[in-house]
C-alpha cells in the first residue's frame, strides 16, 4: 500500500501543469459551491428571522375560517373573545399580542394605493415584533391616536413624509364603508421588504372602533424562543386551545409556506453548482487520467508482467486521481472559507439596487446580504470532490487494464 | 524446470490467421543461459511471452516447475509471475518517477517483504550490478546501460527461478550491450538463475551456452555449448 501511495504521489508531480489545471478547475467549482451555498443559507436564515421578528411572530392564533380566506383578510371571521384565548394560553410559555389586519385603500393627493393595514397595540406589540427598532423617520405609534406608520417604500411610492395626512378607505366588519383620516407619524425601514412595500400600521384601539370590531381581533400573535421546535410547540398550543372550537394555531412555518417553498427551490441552485462540480470532476479528472493512462500503457504492462494485481494498479490510479481531487478540494475549501468569511462579516450591500428599484427577490432581506456558515457544505464538498475524482478515474484505468499484457508492452 | 510441449500459437490479423508457433517442444533446465534466436517474425518473442505466462498458447502445454500453466486463472498466473519469473525488456520499462532504488525494491514490495529486508537486499544487489552511489537517481539521470542494469536488478531482486529477457541489448551500443551480457552471465554464475533471451544479435548468441534457433514458428536447431 505504501508503494502505491508513493507511486501515486510521484506521478502527481510528473505532469505538474496538468495536475495544477485540473485541481484549479475543481477548486473553482468547490469554492463557487461553498460561496453560493453560504449565501443562500445566510439569506434563508435571515429571512426566517425577519419573518418572525417583523411578519408573523413565532405563531398566530386565528379562526379557521379566517385562515381559509386569509388573503382577503375577512374581518367577519375575527376572534370574538381574545381575552379568553390569552387567559387559556397563560402558563404556556408564550408572549401574546393582538392584531387586526384589514385591507384598505390609501388616498393621498390624486393617487391611491391598496395596502395591508394592521391594527397593533403599541405596548404589547413591541414585546414580539421589532418594528419600533426600524423607524427611519418620525416616531412610533401611541395608543388611541389617529396616527399611522408606513413602510418606507410605500411612503416613497405615495410621496408622503412624516406629518402629512392621508385617508384610508376600508369596510367595517359588517361591510359598511369607512374612511380613516390619519397623520403619518413615522416611516419604517424594516429589513423585511414585505413590511416596507405595502404595510401601514394604526393603533388597535382606532381600528377596533372604526371597524366595529367590538373587542374582536383577527389574530393573536404568539412568541416563544427560537430553540423550541415550532411544530411541537404549536401542537401543544392547539391542545391547550381545544376548548375553543373554530380556532387554530399556525406556526410561522405554516404561515410562510410560500416563502419556504421558494427558498427550498433556490437552495436547489446550490445543488446545481454541486452537480457542476461533479461535471468538472468528471470531465477534468477523466481527461487527465485518460491521458496519464495512455502515456503509461507500457508501464502498466510492465507492472502486470511483474505480477502486480490489476486491482493494485487500479488503486494506484485511484490514489493519483484522489490526490488531484484532494489538492483541488482543499484549495477550493480554503478559497470558500475566505469568501464565506468576507460574506459572513461584511456581506454585499444591495441597498441602492433594492431601495431604488424596490426590488423583491423572494427573500425577506433588504440591503446587506450576508452569508451563514454551513459546515455540512464544507464536509460534503470535500467528500464529493475527492470521491468524484476517484470514481471518475475508474473508467480510464479499466480501459488500460483490459489490454493484453503483451499488447501493452508493445504499445507506442 | 520448464517444459514446452507441442505448443502452437495462432494470431488473427483481420481475416488472416498467422501461425506464430507451430508445435514447439523445448525443455529448459535450471541455471541455463539460453538464447532463442531467429529472424524477425520467427516467433521468438511469442515463445518468450508464452514461457513468461504473459500470453496463452493456442494448443499444447507449458509446465513451469511442474505446474501446467494453461489451466491457470489470470490471478494465478500473476502470482506465478510475481514469485517465479523476472523480466528484462528491450526498452528497460523503468518507472520514470521512481529512483533506481525504488524501481528495484518495488518488485520485493509486491511480495510483501518487510522494509528492512527490502532495503538490505536492494542496496546489495544495486552494488552487485555496479550502481552503487546511483540509488537515488531517476531513470532519466542514468545512461541506457545503467538503466538496463537497474532492469536486470529489478528482475533478479526477488530471486526468481528464471529471468526472461526480450532483446535486452537491442537499445544499447555494442560495448554497453556486452557489459550487460557480462553482468547477466555473472548473475547466472553467482545466483544460479536461469536466463532465457530472445535475440537476433550475434553477440548475444555468442554469449549463450545453449542456442535454440527458430524459423517460421518451428525449432530448427538446439545447440548446447561448453562453458
Image (cartoon, rainbow, N blue to C red):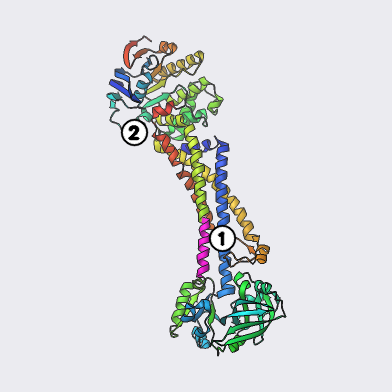
Horizontal relation, residue B76 to residue A134: left or right: left
The residue lying at 34 percent from left, 15 percent from top is B216
Is label 2 in contact with label 1 (beta carbons under 8 Å)? Answer: no
Residue wearing tag 1: A40
Which of the pair A30/A330 is nearer the observer? A30
Residue wearing tag 2: B74
Give the alpha-carbon distance from disc 2 to disc 1, as whole Å: 53 Å
Where on the picture, by quarter, is residue B11? top left
Q: Is residue A264 magenta?
A: yes
Closer mark to the observer between disc 2 and disc 1: 1
Image coordinates of residue A71 in percent, x first then y, are 52, 76
The residue lying at 43 percent from left, 80 percent from top is A239
Mark 2 residue crowding within 10 angstroms, few (<14) / some (14–19) / many (20+):
few
Residue B165 in sight from this viewpoint: yes
Image coordinates of residue A125 in percent, x first then y, are 60, 80
Q: Is residue B23 above or below residue A332?
A: above
Q: Quadrant of the N terminus of chain A?
A: top left
The residue lying at 53 percent from left, 67 percent from top is A259
Element assignment for label 1: helix
Which of the pair A230/B137 is nearer the observer? A230
Image coordinates of residue A179 in percent, x first then y, are 62, 85
Magenta-tinted stretch = A256-270
Q: Is residue A127 above or below residue A370?
A: below
Image coordinates of residue A235 in percent, x first then y, are 45, 76
Q: Is residue A87 above or below residue A364?
A: below
Amino acid at each position: 500500500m505504501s508503494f502505491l501511495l508513493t507511486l501515486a504521489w510521484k506521478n502527481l508531480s510528473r505532469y505538474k501543469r496538468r495536475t495544477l489545471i485540473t485541481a484549479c478547475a475543481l477548486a473553482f467549482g468547490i469554492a463557487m459551491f461553498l460561496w453560493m451555498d453560504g449565501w443562500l443559507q445566510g439569506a434563508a436564515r435571515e429571512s426566517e428571522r425577519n419573518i418572525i421578528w417583523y411578519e408573523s411572530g413565532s405563531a398566530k392564533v386565528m379562526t379557521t375560517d379566517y385562515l381559509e380566506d386569509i388573503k382577503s383578510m375577512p374581518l367577519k371571521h375575527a376572534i370574538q373573545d381574545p381575552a379568553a384565548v390569552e387567559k387559556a394560553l397563560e402558563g404556556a410559555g408564550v408572549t401574546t399580542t393582538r392584531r387586526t389586519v384589514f385591507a384598505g385603500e390609501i388616498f393621498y393627493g390624486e393617487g391611491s394605493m391598496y395596502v395591508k393595514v394592521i391594527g397593533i397595540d403599541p405596548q404589547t406589540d413591541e414585546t414580539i415584533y421589532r418594528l419600533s427598532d426600524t423607524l427611519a423617520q418620525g416616531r412610533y405609534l401611541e395608543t388611541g391616536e389617529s396616527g399611522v406608520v408606513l413602510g418606507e417604500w410605500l411612503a416613497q411610492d405615495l410621496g408622503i413624509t412624516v406629518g402629512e395626512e392621508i385617508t384610508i378607505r376600508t369596510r367595517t366588519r359588517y361591510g359598511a364603508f369607512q374612511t380613516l383620516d390619519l397623520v403619518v407619524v413615522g416611516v419604517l425601514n424594516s429589513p423585511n421588504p414585505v413590511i416596507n412595500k405595502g404595510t401601514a400600521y394604526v393603533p388597535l384601539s382606532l381600528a377596533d372602533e372604526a371597524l366595529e370590531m367590538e373587542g374582536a381581533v383577527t389574530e393573536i400573535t404568539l412568541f416563544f424562543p427560537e430553540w423550541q421546535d415550532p411544530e411541537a410547540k404549536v401542537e401543544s398550543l392547539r391542545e391547550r386551545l381545544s376548548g375553543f372550537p373554530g380556532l387554530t394555531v399556525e406556526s410561522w412555518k405554516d404561515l410562510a409556506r410560500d416563502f419556504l417553498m421558494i427558498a427550498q427551490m433556490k437552495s436547489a441552485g446550490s445543488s446545481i453548482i454541486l452537480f457542476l462540480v461533479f461535471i468538472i470532476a468528471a470531465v477534468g479528472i477523466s481527461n487527465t487520467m485518460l491521458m496519464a493512462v495512455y502515456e503509461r500503457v507500457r508501464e502498466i504492462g510492465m507492472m502486470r508482467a511483474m505480477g502486480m494485481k490489476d486491482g493494485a494498479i487500479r488503486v494506484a490510479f485511484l490514489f493519483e486521481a484522489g490526490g488531484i481531487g484532494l489538492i483541488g478540494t482543499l484549495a477550493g475549501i480554503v478559497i470558500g472559507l475566505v469568501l464565506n468569511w468576507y460574506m459572513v462579516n461584511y456581506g454585499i450591500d444591495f441597498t441602492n439596487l433594492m431601495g431604488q428599484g424596490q426590488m423583491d427577490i423572494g427573500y425577506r432581506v433588504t440591503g446587506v446580504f450576508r452569508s451563514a456558515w454551513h459546515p455540512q457544505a464544507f464536509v460534503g464538498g470535500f467528500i464529493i470532490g475527492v470521491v468524484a475524482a476517484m470514481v471518475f478515474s475508474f473508467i480510464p484505468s479499466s480501459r488500460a487494464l483490459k489490454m493484453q499484457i503483451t499488447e501493452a508492452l508493445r504499445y507506442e | 524446470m520448464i517444459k514446452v510441449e507441442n505448443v502452437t500459437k495462432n494470431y488473427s490479423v483481420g481475416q488472416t490467421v498467422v501461425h506464430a508457433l507451430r508445435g514447439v517442444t523445448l525443455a529448459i533446465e535450471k541455471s541455463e543461459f539460453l538464447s532463442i534466436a531467429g529472424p524477425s517474425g520467427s516467433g521468438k518473442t511469442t515463445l518468450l511471452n508464452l514461457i513468461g505466462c504473459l500470453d496463452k498458447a493456442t494448443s499444447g502445454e507449458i509446465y513451469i516447475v511442474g505446474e501446467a500453466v494453461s489451466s491457470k486463472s489470470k490471478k494465478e498466473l500473476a502470482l506465478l509471475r510475481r514469485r517465479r519469473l523476472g523480466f528484462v525488456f528491450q526498452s528497460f520499462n523503468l518507472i520514470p518517477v521512481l529512483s533506481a532504488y525504488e524501481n528495484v525494491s518495488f518488485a520485493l514490495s509486491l511480495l510483501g517483504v518487510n522494509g528492512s529486508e527490502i532495503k538490505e537486499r536492494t542496496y546489495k544487489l544495486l552494488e552487485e550490478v555496479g550502481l552503487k552511489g546511483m540509488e537515488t537517481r531517476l531513470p532519466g539521470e542514468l545512461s541506457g546501460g545503467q538503466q538496463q542494469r537497474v532492469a536486470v536488478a529489478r528482475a533478479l531482486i526477488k530471486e526468481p527461478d528464471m529471468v526472461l529477457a526480450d532483446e535486452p541489448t537491442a537499445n544499447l551500443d555494442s560495448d554497453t550491450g556486452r557489459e550487460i551480457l557480462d553482468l547477466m552471465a555473472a548473475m547466472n554464475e553467482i545466483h544460479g538463475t536461469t536466463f532465457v533471451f530472445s535475440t537476433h544479435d550475434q553477440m548475444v548468441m555468442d554469449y549463450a551456452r545453449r542456442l535454440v534457433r527458430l524459423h517460421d514458428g518451428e525449432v530448427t536447431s538446439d545447440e548446447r555449448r561448453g562453458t
